[in-house]
Image (cartoon, rainbow, N blue to C red):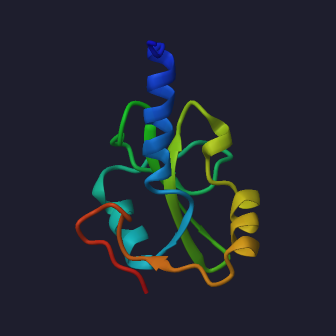
Amino acid sequence: MTVPDGAVLAASREAVLARFPLSRVSEAFFDDMLGVLPPAHIAGVPGFFVTEAVSEDIHAQFVHAGGRFYGGYVGLRDRATWITHARIAEFDVAHPDAVELAWYPDGPKEAAR
């Protein structure tokens, strides 16, 4: 049985997105990412995107909202993956005691507060 190329690409894309789902991040992490490369902004979308892609159209997005900082991998061509104020509100309700990441979850500087 062979798997269509599209199915393999979709599965690998989902795996990359899952490596850094919407999370609370530290202010220092947020600030570091703001200064790495020129940030990309999309009108009407909160926060900024890191301009260097993680893979294909997947980029890290960071948002400062309600005195907290958030980040995660998103697909630029898939608005449903973008971090919005509504997604942040849902996240906060579902994770009231979320760990604040000090670096990417799969990175060498992984740490939490």
The answer to whether 79 is drawn above or below residue 45 in the figure is above
Q: In this view of the protein, which residue sits in the foreground, 86 or 113? A: 113
Q: Where's residue 15, x and y in %?
A: 45, 43
Q: Residue at x 57, y 60 (%)?
A: 22
Q: Position of residue 107 (x, y in %)?
A: 28, 62
Q: Is residue 107 left or right of residue 87?
A: left
Q: Position of residue 65 (x, y in %)?
A: 64, 70
Q: Is residue 57 above or below residue 23?
A: above
Out of 41 and 1, give the one closest to the viewer: 1
Say which residue appears at 38% left-offset and 76% top-offset: 102
Position of the C terminus, as image quadrant, is bottom left
**Which residue is located at x 53 percent, y 38 percent?**
75
Q: Quadrant of residue 67?
A: bottom right
Quarter where residue 52 is shown: top left
The image shows residue 35, relative to residue 37, as above or below, that is below
Q: Residue at x 53, y 57 (%)?
A: 21
